[in-house]
Amino acid sequence: MPELLANLNPEQHAAVTLPNEPALILAGAGSGKTRVLITRIAWLIQQGLASPPTILGVTFTNKAAREMMSRLSALLPIDTRGMWIGTFHGLCNRMLRAHFRDAGLPQTFQILDTADQLSAIKRLMKGLNIDDEKYPAKNLQYFINNAKEQGLRAKDVDATDNFNRKFVELYEAYDQQCQREGVVDFPELLLRCYELLSYNPPLRAHYQARFRHILVDEFQDTNKLQYAWLKLLAGEHNAIFAVGDDDQSIYAFRGANVGNMRDFEQEFKVRNLIKLEQNYRSHGHILDAANHLIANNSRRLGKNLRTDAGHGEPVRVYEAATDSQEAGWIVEEIRALISTGASRSEIAVLYRSNAQSRTIEHTLVNAGIPYRVYGGLRFFERQEVKHALAYLRLIDNPNDDTAFARVVNFPTRGIGARSIEQLADAARLYNTSMAVAIPYVTGKAGTSLGGFANLIAKMRAETAQMSLPETVEYVVRASGLSEFYQNEREGQDRLENLQELVNAATAFVSEEGYGLDTPARSIPLRPGATAAPELVVATDDPGVDVLDAENPADPAQNPDTMTPLAGFLSHASLEAGDNQAQAGQEAVQLMTVHAAKGLEFTAVFITGLEEGLFPHENSAMETDGLEEERRLMYVAITRAKERLYLSFAQSRMLHGQTRYNIRSRFFDELPQETLKWLTPKVEAGARWGGRSDNAGWGRDWFSRPDRQQGYGGGASTVPSAPLPAFANEQRAADTGFRVGQQVFHTKFGEGTVTALEGGGADAKAQVKFKRHGEKWLALAVAKLQAVE
DNA sequence: CCCACCGACTTTTTT
DNA sequence: AGTCGGTGGG
């Protein structure tokens, strides 16, 4: 259909219409990556080259998967049922549910999120009397997840020393515990699915024959295991259509392996490498800045963005004295933008780390500007919600000790640490879960535990025929949770969230297409289906067509391979909900650079551009850390459509200490002709001269020099002198002053020394002036007199 | 069992 | 600074 391909540029067109072979699409920021991916699927189907069940679309986030689905169905009216589009984890979950027996899992297996996993590990270590000081649970968690993401079971890990040997031993014990409890953690979903396919040739052949078109989004973010999983599924035909951007790889810290792109190109002998370099988002200067910056990275696959839009405005740069002054300036600029008709939601303030948001938030609150922060607690991670889910999990699977431990005494019912310890001992002795071990505990502990066991049993019986929303509502009440939060002073929000959980259950049921009265704990069969919904694949499986047409248990035909309750619990683990604190109205967007990936805004502020912060000091310790920081900066810059602001502060309050930073090295990596300094640019190593005018300010109609305070003008204000990068401790050397001392300055008047730093020619003092606030003064320049 | 206090921690984050 | 987690007293 021609209109499908209309308006695609030549590269996009070429990518969409590639033959069914391995392909790597290097898609720059704002180059229409998602559009290509979606149009490709639509085109394949429309041309009769593929049917929906032969398509596997893989993304990293649920949001991306949803967007893919909705844009696809908007593009053409196809039956998307049978098409598998989802996250790696979601797809693996689906496959494991369909083949739970082959995968060695109970039908009701539950998914541990990161927090659940950590508490499971802590419980394990406690049971084994492992010293948490010597072997921190967090480290073990990292170790286990890391190993799994490399595709390694405990037996496959090389234990190089005693310390590692202990970790390997604990990894093994942890996996056994998970198996006994019938739970899987996030990386386990992938590894287990990988093993399922690799140890089960008929099943593997089935899926390989079925998914003839595998499309992967954000390929640069895949880890080793995900790569291996894809490769296994692709099989002989190898037709993976991978879309990604090595320059936007910013998740190495969580296992993403950019090298996968190059490996893919070589291993799959990719003949079709297409670069999407036409950018439809940003104006010229912004793009120039991004290109110029990222050119400093080595080992790139190579790509240069271009635009048809004009140069646009220059990139504005602002140097502030302090973080709060930086925030003040940002807010003034935002005000000005809004007054010219800019939409608040089209303005984003980005920062490297979450801690930086506070100052900006305070300033925005004071200015009365609505804003929205991304990255708070998500719905399914709230404690009251997790408590309710734990009861639900326990109803479904009594062996889930993580859920058991969470709620056995919440709300409190007189089951203390001692009773739980006794129970845990009994469970270990009989090698059962805690719930099952309850009858073995005697005495008072046994009685109260028995009460809890009865409660769960009663819940299980009562909810047997209830629908999912009814079950949730019943559990919230019968568990005592609603009563508990009713009596809690600050419990109103939590009560509302529990009600919201019931609503979420209702929404889930309707979205999944269940009848409203479908029992939550039975597997609904589609009309005509008689088999238990586990897909059985014959060894001489002829392939996709027969199965798709005739096997009602094929997950493609029958999506109900799990009960509504199991589905809902999976959903709660796999999709923790929205990440926005305050949704809703027109608001300025605040978020980390990471969170901004994939988004775009008319105006973008990149703040805190200081050595130590951005690039972050910790990155200096990591291999290729600086390059990843640079990619992060690249992502940040390319979020802006029309206007980009960069700012940094000489001093910043961080972790209760004032730090003095020099401006980020990234400024030196930007093309200077695209930059417009709103404050005078201080060359590295140079001192500020005695400026007394505002020359260099105010040319830009947005800047408001009259509103600035405590900066500029003063000959003695400390400039971005060559401070050591990452300096953050106070060194009171031979300054001749001491903290607390009363001093006098010819211009600022009386004040008190609040901090000292450096020595000799570089010595500086922070002085709190009675009338001019706190300032940093270079003692070599400032005429500071001791009063006394 | 609950509360209060102390101390450690603090890059980025999805599933 | 601010939060979370662990410990100890009431």
Image: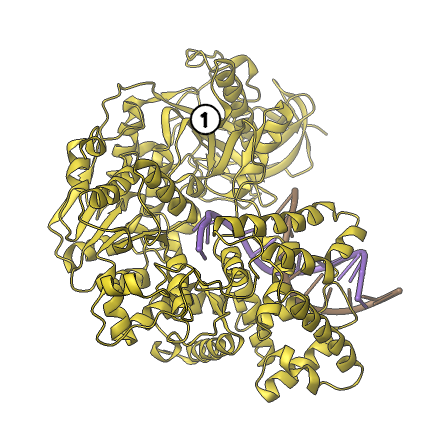
Chain colours: A yellow, B purple, C brown
Q: Secondary structure at mark 1?
A: helix
Which residue is drawn at the image coordinates 31% and 27% (left, top)? A282
Q: Is residue A5 above or below residue A411?
A: above
Examine the rendering and report whether any part of residue A630 can be seen. no
Question: Toward the viewer: A749 or A201?
Answer: A201
Q: Please identify the quarter of the rendering in which residue A132 is found.
A: bottom right
Please state the chain letter of the residue tagged with numbered disc 1 in the rendered image: A
Q: Please identify the quarter of the rendering in which residue A315 is found.
A: top left
Which residue is drawn at the image coordinates 44% and 23% (left, top)? A688
Query: The C terminus of chain A is located in which quarter?
Result: top right
Which residue is drawn at the image coordinates 54% and 71% (left, top)? A121
Q: Is residue A137 above or below residue A25?
A: below
For this view, does A230 lie left or right of residue A323? left
Percent of width and height locating residue A71: 35, 38
Residue reaching furthest to the front:
A528
Q: Residues within 10 Å of mark 1 (few under 14, many from 20)?
A: some
**Label total for image:** 1
Examine the rendering and report whether any part of residue A728 can be seen. yes
For this view, does A406 lie left or right of residue A317? right
Residue type, label 1: Glu
- Residue hosting label 1: A346
For this view, does A499 lie left or right of residue A50? right
Percent of width and height locating residue C2: 65, 45
Question: Toward the viewer: A697 or A226?
Answer: A226
Question: Toward the viewer: A316 or A721?
Answer: A316
Q: Is residue A455 above or below residue A372?
A: below
Percent of width and height locating residue A340: 48, 13
Query: The N terminus of chain A is located in which quarter?
Result: top left
Percent of width and height locating residue A326: 52, 28
